[in-house]
Image (cartoon, grey):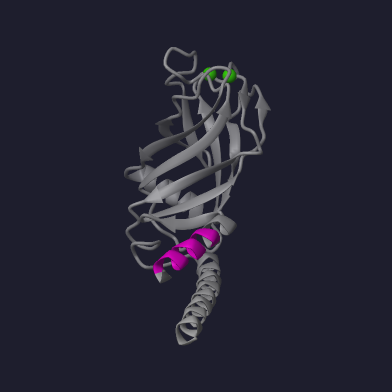
Amino acid sequence: MVVKLIRFFMLISCLVLSRCTADGAIIVSAPQSGFSGFSSLPIPVGTLDFTGISPFTVQSLSWTFTIFDGDTGPGDFDFNDVSIGLDGIDTGILLNGFLDDQTITRTINGNLIGALATNVTNAIFTDNSLNVTLIDRSPGDNFWELPSSSRFEIAFFDIPDGGVNGGVVPEPASMATFLGLSIGMVLFRRIRASKSSREVS
Ligand SMILES: [Ca+2]
Ligand SMILES: [Ca+2]
């Protein structure tokens, strides 16, 4: 019962903050840019806020986007042509699987190795902000729509020096978790007191 209550209120804390820890990952999310149209510049997905998150080295991560008319499915004209940009750094990780004339929500996994991991880590924690873009190697030919009614997120895994595995919990999440746990404990005590009174009577 206690475990269920704790899990429930941690989930609430997580949803309220759009930033949470689950299964050894740190997840950061934000509304999508609402971009609609063609552009020869990188397509803006949105900006993630890392304020209050203890710095960690970025290694393995997954991105979840909702895109209409991506044209990056097998056989589409931008298949193998679009990669994910983080603060202007081309990760080289491809955005395949977003189909022509359809709204698709899809998660892309990837690993950042060596200088790429260092550069992205520095890009995030110099200003606690990460601008995410789509970099088209054949720019200007694709109509994109990234609805602002959808959120995008990045989940960071295998965090060696901070985050969950290092036992460092982000400050805002700590406060929300504390509030959630406090409410949970009050409810638990009330339920237990109610049970006790029933057993006595
Ligand atoms: Ca293209
Ligand atoms: Ca398109």
Locate residue 152, reporting x and y percent: 55, 41
Q: Is residue 79 left or right of residue 35?
A: left
Which image quadrant: the N terminus?
A: bottom left
* Relative to 155, 160 lies left or right: left
Q: Residue at x 44, y 60 (%)?
A: 55
Residue shown at 44%/36% (left/top)? Answer: 107
In reply to whether residue 11 is colored magenta, the answer given is: yes
Q: Is 72 on the left or on the right of 16, as rendered?
A: left
Residue 167 x %, y %: 37, 68
Residue drawn 42% across the image and 21% down it: 80
Please identify the residue farthest to the bottom as the structure is shown: 200
Q: Count the marks.
A: 0
Q: Is residue 11 visible?
A: yes
Q: Is residue 126 visible?
A: no
On the image, the x and y values in percent for residue 59 come to 35, 48
Q: Main secondary structure of the magenta part?
A: helix
Location of residue 151 with respect to 57 vertically, above or below = above
Q: Which residues are magenta?
A: 3-12
Residue 64, given in percent of the width and then of the height, sits at 49, 39
